[in-house]
Amino acid sequence: MSELAGSKRQIPNALLERARELRKQQTPAEELLWECLRNRRLLNTKFRRQHNIDRYIIDFYCHDKLLIIEVDGSIHDTQQAEDAIRENWLKANGFSVIRFRNEQILNHIEAVLNEIANAIDSVSSK
């Protein structure tokens, strides 16, 4: 088990391994968004991909802003209740969460990046 960042909680090795697998198996939308976020390309803000927070694997995470970006593919149509529970838990624990559908990222990347930039600025000004 590995320690959860900033706490004494442990992350199960199986969850860490699953995050590694997901980093190797990105969807086209995740790959495009990662190319735009990696290496501080957006507002000099550092993001991690497929990052573990408690029992969840987050698509993209900015630790400095406690900002989470989730990319929803077709699987999310059938797991809306689970997504709501997860998002409520994350928000209750101080994280900001924004969601995009694959189609938004693939077809309107500039609008997606503008929304992320606005979220970064919003969190910065709190």
Image (cartoon, rainbow, N blue to C red):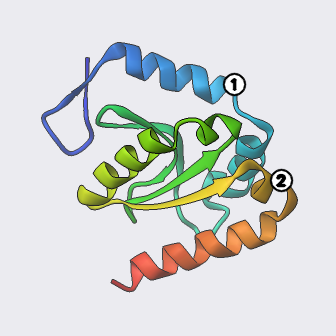
Identified at 63% across, 73% down, the residue is 115
Say which of marks 1 and 2 sits in front: 2
Image quadrant in which the C terminus is located:
bottom left
Asked whether the viewer can see residue 43, the reply is: no
Residue 29 position, x and y percent, is 76, 45
In this view, the residue in front, 25 or 2, is 25
Q: Closer to the camera, 8 or 15? A: 15
Side (left or right) of 70 relative to 24:
left
Residue reaching furthest to the top: 14
Give the quadrant of the N terminus: top left
Q: Secondary structure at mark 1?
A: loop
Mark 2 closeness class: few <14, some 14–19, many ≥20 residues within 10 Å: some
Q: Residue at x 37, y 44 (%)?
A: 86
Asked if one can make out residue 9 in the rendered structure from this viewpoint, the answer is yes
3 with respect to 48 (left or right): left
| Residue occupying the point 52% across, 37% down | 79
105 to 25, vertically: above or below: below
- According to the image, label 1 marks what residue? 25
